[in-house]
Image: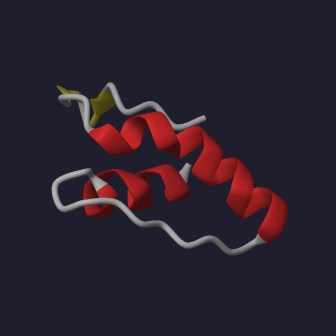
Amino acid sequence: MYNSGNIAGDTMNSLPIDAALPALLKALHDRNEVVLQAPPGAGKTTRVPLALLD
C-alpha cells in the first residue's frame, strides 16, 4: 500500500491529497476510472503518480 512518509529515504511533509489516496486507489480498483479534483498545492502531481506505482 502507498506510504507517503518515506520516498527514496526522504521524509516528506503531509499534503492534503494524502487523506484521499486510499479512497482514490479503491475507486480506481473498483471502477477503473476516476476524476480527481483538488486545489493547487494539494499534491496531485507529486503524490498520485507515486501512489499509482505501488
Residue 11, percent from left and from top: 20, 24
Q: Residue shown at 55%/73% (left/top)?
A: 35
* x 26%, y 56%: residue: 46
Figure quadrant of residue 10? top left
Extreme residue in the right direction: 30
User: Foreground: 7 or 31?
Assistant: 31
Count of labels in the image: 0
Q: How is the image coloured?
A: secondary structure
Please give left or right for residue 7 compared with residue 40 in the image.
right
- Tell me if 20 is positioned left or right of 39 in this view: right
Residue at screen point 37% across, 45% down = 17
Q: Nearer the viewer, residue 2 or 22?
A: 22
Tell me: 4 left or right of 22. left
Q: Residue 1, image x and y in percent?
A: 60, 35
Residue 40 pos. (x, y %): 18, 62
Residue 14 position, x and y percent, is 25, 29
Q: Residue at x 33, y 25 (%)?
A: 5
Q: Is residue 19 placed above or below 21 in the rendered structure?
A: above
Horizontally, is 9 left or right of 51 in the view?
left
